[in-house]
Image (cartoon, rainbow, N blue to C red):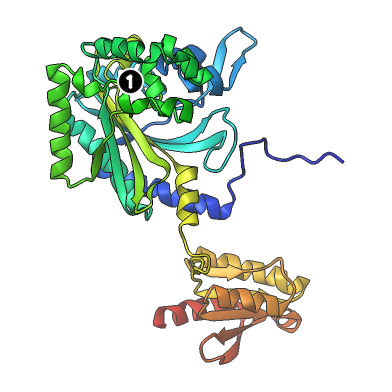
Amino acid sequence: MLKFQTPNGMHDLLSDDLTEFEKAKKTAAKIADFYGFEMIETPIMEFSALFEKGTGLSTDIVEKEMYTLQTKGGDSLTLRPEYTPGIARAYIQHGMQALPKPVRLWYFGPVFRHERPQAGRLRQFYQLGFESLGVKEPVVDAVIILMAFQFLKSLGFRNLAIDINTIGDAQCRPAFRRSLLGYYRNKQGSLCPDCKRRLKKNPLRILDCKDERCSRFKKNAPQILDFLCKECHNYFKELLEFLDELELPYNLNSNLVRGLDYYTKTVFEIYEDTEEGRVQGSLAGGGRYDDLVRLLGGKDTPACGVALGIDRLLNLQKGGKEENEVKEKEEKADVFLAQVGDLARKKGLKLFSDLRGSGVKIGEALHKDSLSGQLKIAEKLQADYILIIGQKEALSGEVIVRDSKTSNQKILPLDKALEEVKKKIKNN
């Protein structure tokens, strides 16, 4: 017998999951609103060329991870593997260049990458991001980092630290690139297959490789700080001064380059730092991308952004809790409606609708027949009053109103129950 399941690397979000996602989204919205960011939602599918050109042909995303299809009209479309190129495209398409600067945008939605599914890595996952376009000042980078830092703290992450680096710009990076090529050229035979390709296309990406065959060479590799032009040096220095003022803990990591071609100057990652060292990889990552809008056909537009994988963050958050930690109680109900029998269920449904329409927080288990089972749910919801309709009450048009604290109860006509319950709740 054929059994259908979710595709590998994709999963259903059930009620508890969606509750946690909504909490995370509301938290992000509060932070975004405080800093003046407006929400944007780009299409789930874009033309493939947008990511090939924007993200970079030599990146893992474009080379290995994109879900791409051909339409009947012959267009090549790709499921969104990340947001930033789409943000830049929307910025150009909707004339945002004319808006007061900076243009501050944030997003929260699904992205798709064909990765090997494992803990913390899904093929469909939700991404949150903050993007600031139009201003080329280190304070913009500092604010973006601060927003991600504050969001992570609001989720309960502690001992956060920032890895930060600069990868220069078009003025100083070519000399650094040549130096890297010279250093790694005679080590090419010892590199992993991916880095052998990177050496030809984008040697900076070798510094991003986690394979031990390549990592061992990083210690003696050329350092970008030795090649920075005066502008990039001063920019990075000023950014670090902002982070010092904000008292954000950071480490200079000269091997941090991030895996996307559009980055310029600032790159950073935020992670949990413990006595045992770095935990679970990065929790947030981003940087400056001053050339992307121009690359996609717009005007010169400096920009900076950060992205966070929500599924992974919420899973880590759950994993950090004690196993015996009590699950958060369900929302409390003022009243619980219990019924026994088909006629009682019909009578109870009308009373339930009237109470809810009057703003009363009411719980029910109309799908259950067992009174004891329903009373357990009422106890779980901490209902102050329980309304009970049995076969006898249904025939006589009455309802039993029981006080949960005292167990005192009285019988009322159904048409009087609504006002009586509202009065009791008001006086409680």
- Between residue 108 and residue 208, name the one nearer to us: 208
Q: Position of residue 258 (x, y in %)?
A: 37, 27
Question: Quadrant of residue 99 in the image?
Answer: top left
- Between residue 183 and residue 124, name the one nearer to us: 183
| Left or right: 204 as drawn, with respect to 2 | left
Q: Is residue 232 above or below residue 360?
A: above
Q: Residue furthest right?
A: 1
Total numbered labels placed on residues in the image = 1
Mark 1: which secondary structure?
helix
Q: Position of residue 254 (x, y in %)?
A: 28, 29
Q: Position of residue 424 (x, y in %)?
A: 46, 82
In what quadrant of the picture does the N terminus appear? top right
Q: Is residue 36 visible?
A: no
- Between residue 329 and residue 145, name the one nearer to us: 145
- Between residue 281 and residue 409, name the one nearer to us: 281
Q: Residue furthest top?
A: 74
| Left or right: 84 as drawn, with respect to 400 | left
Q: Which residue is mark 1?
A: 91
User: Amino acid type of disc 1?
Assistant: Tyr
Query: Which residue is painted at 35% across and 11% down in the image?
Result: 181
| Left or right: 405 as drawn, with respect to 281 | right
Query: Which residue is painted at 12% across and 18% down in the image?
Result: 230
Query: Which residue is painted at 17% across and 47% down in the image?
Result: 247
Q: Assess disc 1: are there few (<14), some (14-19) or many (≥20) residues with their C-alpha within 10 Å of its C-alpha.
A: many
Q: Is residue 398 above or below residue 193?
A: below
Query: Which residue is painted at 44% across and 36% down in the image?
Result: 127
Q: Is residue 71 above or below residue 315?
A: above
Q: Is residue 385 visible?
A: yes
Q: Is residue 144 above or below residue 16?
A: above
Question: Quadrant of residue 341 in the image?
Answer: bottom right
Q: Position of residue 84 (x, y in %)?
A: 38, 25
In what quadrant of the picture does the C terminus appear? bottom left
